[in-house]
Image: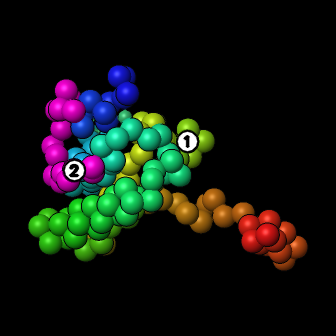
Amino acid sequence: MENCIFCKIVSKRLPAFITYESNDVIAFLDINPINPGHTLVCTKEHFDVLTKVPEKLAQGLMTAVKDVSAKLIIKLGYQGFNILQNNDKCAGQIVPHIHFHVIPRNPDDLVRFNWSENIKRMSEEQFKETYRRLTT
Ligand code: 5GP
Ligand code: ZN
């Protein structure tokens, strides 16, 4: 993809701090980190969202996410991490080239995702209907 920022990083036309590279996956430091070491893990081939990634490649992608996460703990001394993966503009995706955010975390890092503010109340009927549609 000619105008894709991450395709440019993959082909080394744009510089990045690349911390992991395999035949089909690459990881590099996010330019606007939530914590130092915040890493983006993406496929070398351009796909916009996760559901378009072929099965085998999705497996390699997850292996890379795991490897990158372990290094943030072992080498940078973090205690934990969040995995975030946005699909589509409506979900906050800015760069339309599939990537996982690996966000390293420590107990008092003051990062808040405010999960509880977004919770929707659902009735038993709504749960049943949702379940029915997903499983039939
Ligand atoms: P999204 O919202 O699409 O999941 O997140 C895209 C991420 O890419 C953002 O966190 C942003 O900081 C990062 N980003 C955007 N442009 C560049 C760039 O040129 N280089 C690097 N290393 N990261 C970028
Ligand atoms: Zn791309």
Q: Are marks 2 and 1 in contact (CB under 8 Å)?
A: no
Residue 78 visible from this viewpoint = no
Q: Nearer the viewer, mark 2 or mark 1?
A: 2
Image quadrant for the N terminus? top left
> Residue reaching furthest left?
75
Residue at position x 45%, y 50% in the image:
53
From the viewer's perspective, tell me whether residue 58 is left or right of residue 28.
Answer: right
Residue visible at 51% across and 47% down?
Answer: 52
Q: Residue at x 55, y 63 (%)?
A: 115
The number of numbered badges drawn on the structure is 2
User: Quadrant location of the C terminus?
Assistant: bottom right
Q: Amino acid at mark 1?
A: Asp
Query: In the rendering, which numbered label is found on residue 97?
Result: none
Q: Which residue is mark 2?
A: 23
Residue extending furthest toward the top:
2
| Circle 2 residues within 10 Å: few <14, some 14–19, many ≥20 | few
Q: Which mark is residue 88?
A: 1
Q: Quadrant of residue 96?
A: top left
Quadrant of the rendered image containing residue 44 = top left
Q: Horizontal and vertical percent for residue 22?
A: 20, 53
Q: Nearer the viewer, residue 41 or 55?
A: 55
Q: Main secondary structure of the magenta part?
A: loop
The part of the chain drawn in magenta is 11-25
Magenta stretch encompasses residue 23: yes
Residue 70: percent from left, percent from top: 22, 70
Disc 2 secondary structure class: loop
Hey, what amino acid is under mark 2? Answer: Asn
Query: Who comes first in sequence, dot 2 or dot 1?
Result: 2
Q: Is residue 32 left or right of residue 12?
A: right
Element class at badge 1: loop
Near-viewer residue (16 or 119)? 16
